Image (cartoon, rainbow, N blue to C red):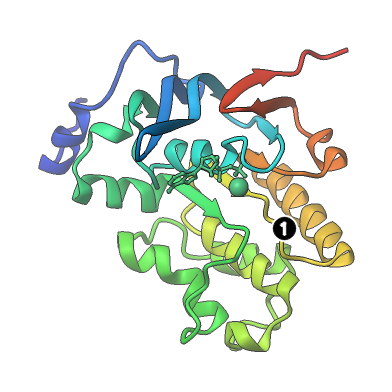
Amino acid sequence: MQTKLTKAERKLNRFHNHEIPENEVLVARELTKTYFQGDYHIKAVDNVFLRVRRGEFVSIVGTSGSGKSTLLHMLAGLDTPTSGQVFLDGYDIHSMDDDQFSDFRAKKIGFIFQSFHLLPVLTAKENILMPQKISGDTRYPSYFDTLTRMLKIDDRLHHLPSELSGGQRQRVAAARALINKPDILFADEPTGNLDRDSAGELIDLLLATRAELGQTLVMVTHDPAVAARADRIYHMENGVLREQKPE
Ligand SMILES: Nc1ncnc2c1ncn2[C@@H]1O[C@H](COP(=O)(O)OP(=O)(O)O)[C@@H](O)[C@H]1O
Ligand SMILES: [Mg+2]
């Protein structure tokens, strides 16, 4: 039986590229970001091609200023490319209008920032449930309990971010990023603002949660030991992305 598409689904379908294989959850082509400043310009991201398969853990390493955040933001639709394309789940995300993309993002993309980005006036629980509020998503009612238990924040849910440690705040941010079971989770130096012990704990919990869920993960990190745990490692230098070949 054929199911009838809703109007929103039909609109979204226009951005679907059927030539992209189903298991390639993230595809970037000729992705470039140029910043113009007066008479000169900086190619922060320079002609990047990338393919990430469903369930993969990919890490990106590189010196400060090499373009890692700019790349990650464009892959997640938080920033607009100067040229090139990003397909998420086969959908060309930079061609959608704001309303379409806002809904798409809330359902399909999770993002963990170095500086947490929690809303200070909301409790941990309210922060975690924010993406569901935005998308009206009620597909996974018991997921909240599972996730907060896995990330060991189930006893901190009624606290404000200011009442939590850095490690706990980042675990709340991780739960928020995962609450809608996104197709892909991005993390931009998630341990950058944590001390060594909380950093280690966060990575252990994040990777254990990822293993449990089979979640696709693209993580920028400056820690070679963390990068080495990924299925594939990329190096970024002057905006150019290169895959490290396995030895
Ligand atoms: N909004 C901006 N305007 C101008 N230049 C920028 C802007 N954002 C980043 N850049 C420049 O782009 C380059 C890459 O920055 P970024 O992506 O933050 O690198 P990384 O995350 O690897 O440290 C740097 O040279 C940075 O100064
Ligand atoms: Mg950065």
Quadrant where the C terminus is found in the figure? top right
Report whether residue 197 is seen: yes
Nearer the observer, 130 or 85: 85
Q: Amino acid at mark 1?
A: Gly
Nearer the observer, 147 or 118: 118
Report whether residue 4 is seen: no
User: Which residue is disc 1 drawn over?
Assistant: 192
Residue beneath the point at 77% across and 50% down: 208
Give the percent coordinates (x, y) of residue 103. Answer: 29, 51
Give the percent coordinates (x, y) of residue 211. Answer: 73, 43
Q: Is residue 7 above or below residue 124?
A: above
Give the percent coordinates (x, y) of residue 78. Answer: 40, 47
The crowd level at tag 1 (other Cα within 10 Å; few <14, some 14-19, many 20+) is some
Q: Among all residues in the image, which is located at the extreme front?
A: 39
- Cβ of mark 1 under 8 A from ligand 2: no
Residue beneath the point at 43% across and 38% down: 74
Residue beneath the point at 74% across and 70% down: 167
Horizontally, is 180 left or right of 201 in the view? left
Give the percent coordinates (x, y) of residue 159. Answer: 61, 88
Question: How many badges with numbers are in the image?
Answer: 1
Nearer the observer, 94 or 107: 94
Residue beneath the point at 38% across and 53% down: 106
Horizontally, is 140 left or right of 244 in the view? left
